[in-house]
Amino acid sequence: MKYDVIIGLEVHVQLKTKSKMFCRCSASVWKAQPNSHTCPVCLGLPGALPVANEEAVREALKIGLALNCQLLNRAKFDRKHYFYPDLSKGYQISQYDLPFCVNGWLEVDGSRIGVTRSHLEEDTGKLVHDDKNSLIDFNRSGIPLMEVVSEPDIRSPQEARLYAQKIQQIVRYLGVSDADMERGSLRVDANVSLQKPGKWKVEDGKVLGVVNNELNPKVEIKNMNSFRSIERALTYEIERQLQLFEKEEKLSQETRGWVEAKGITVKQRSKEFAPDYRYFPEPDLPPFVFKNSYFEVIKKEIPELPDQKINRFYHDYALEIKEAEIVTATKELADWFEGAVKAYAQTEKEGTTYDHIDSWKVKLIYNWVSGELLRRINELQVPLGEVKVTPAQLAELLYLIDKGEISSTIAKEVFAEMFKTGLDAKKIVEEKGLKQVSDEIQLREAVREVINLNPKPVADIAVGKKEAKGFLIGQIMKMTSGRANPGLVNKILEEELG
Amino acid sequence: MAIQKTQVQHVAELAQLKLTSSELEKYTKQLSEIIDYDMGLLNKIETDGIEPTAQVTGLEDVTQNDNPRPSLDQKEALKNVPETEEGYFKTGVILEQ
Ligand SMILES: [Zn+2]
């Protein structure tokens, strides 16, 4: 039996505001002493009144726009009730029937994934468990949290990972969240079920059965702490469900936790109460009535997003889509790349402003950025912001190659030095004496010496073994510490060998 | 009857109450009578053309700037807590969900 895989994701993104969602406690709580960032509001003390954070609302609307959502002119906050010690008030302020953003979508690897809604809420406190007790830290309580709920449009574990990564990329482009899964500023829960083809449909974000409403149960997966674990957990869970169906065993609708170390999902104990959130409008927070003109203002604050950038780099710079994806991975990298392109275009027509650049030059920059630059960044684990080389300095280095002052092999050596010291290419070339040797007399001397020292390869060439010539050129380059002008070496070698 | 037994059972579970079947019967009847009476009163009020609201102040769009202010310090935050440990609120063991 073949089944359709149906996955929906709930992605929680912690916003990077300075203060919390409904009080003005500082939201910079990473590694802070427990319970050092609280007040009567976020501790849920009686009589304390919440006031919404203007910046958090703005950022929520930005996320909605970036996810192609419709923004609602009338929105409000609601109370969502449940009892758990990480919740100071006995309810969480969230949004129920009038969230800020509805009906969006994201394109992931060519497929469109619907976004049912995106709403703003407050984060809960953090629990630490041991055998005998549970400890609570309310520093995180009240930090603004954006929840993005997808339609059940995701069809594979890989697509689920890509979707979550895309949300991370977008909120980072917007600058509204660190969206770091390891630090918990991006959290992902998944719903997955397997249904018989043709026997299900989606209505209002819900999977419904076509005949008698009969469906296979869905399972919610939590505790996925990395993008890789999203893919692994879903792959495992799909296989588990398939095997149950094959053995004709019953699958129950439940919440399961991903156990990273064992690579399995396990049933989580259900909350010890009947789930009923009893949502009702938050009486302490007046509703929002947004004018369209306000949405227009927010729209103008949204930077060029990854998809638009990829498209522009494809059209303006003739990069392949895959290449454009690599250099637009982060906004910072895309800016760096484009900065280098523009600087390179200017060195070409010294002093003029950028208007056009040949596509082979863009490709060259692409190769340096995706190769030398990214390789070093990944190896040394330095953020791009701390890299000492500037885009203009890379452009200057490439210009030195164009002018024949250094070979591309030497240029890599120079770049390594630039990366380490932040010095200009010109200066490094001068100080280290790396300038290309194009002096014919000097090179002819080196060529003759190599010929004398290597009678065997010379004899090989004489009987037509062409590959021996490569060996001789290698020896000449070695002798000149790689500085010899390769074209000239080739020409002189031909002459000397007659 | 305005209230079903299943609803009373659900509310009892939320309140962590265990009801016998005769209690369930009794409360279903009582709650139904109360709801019928109240709804009867409410239904007499003319509400045509009135927008539903959860607010009585008439305020809209109330926000504050994103400027942090000092929080309570840890000692103050924990002052009225029955049990603490190393700066944390302490409770009995909670099962991981
Ligand atoms: Zn607070």
Image (cartoon, coloured by chain):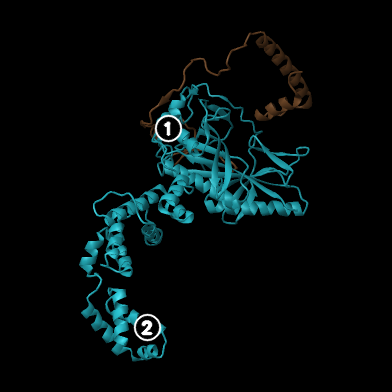
Chain colours: A cyan, B brown
Nearest to N terminus: mark 1 or mark 2: 1
Quick one: quadrant of the C terminus of chain A? bottom left
| Front position in the image: A368 or A376 | A368
Residue A85 screen position, x and y as percent: 54, 35
Q: Secondary structure at mark 2?
A: helix
In the displayed structure image, the side of residue A22 where residue A10 appears, left or right: right
Residue A9 screen position, x and y as percent: 58, 43
Q: Residue at 44% of width from left, 50% of height from top?
A: A315
In the displayed structure image, the side of residue A48 where residue A469 appears, left or right: left
- Which subunit holds the residue at mark 2? A
Can you tell which quarter of the image residue A30 is in? top left
Judge the density around disc 1: few (<14), some (14-19), many (≥20) Cα neighbours within 10 Å: some
Q: Secondary structure at mark 1?
A: helix
The residue beneath circle 1 is A298
Q: Using the numbered discs, state the Cα–Cα distance from disc 1 to disc 2 in whole angstroms.
A: 65 Å
| Front position in the image: A372 or B88 | A372
Count of numbered marks: 2
The residue beneath circle 2 is A469
Question: What is the three-letter code of the residue carrying label 2?
Answer: Lys
Nearer to us of marks 1 and 2 is 2
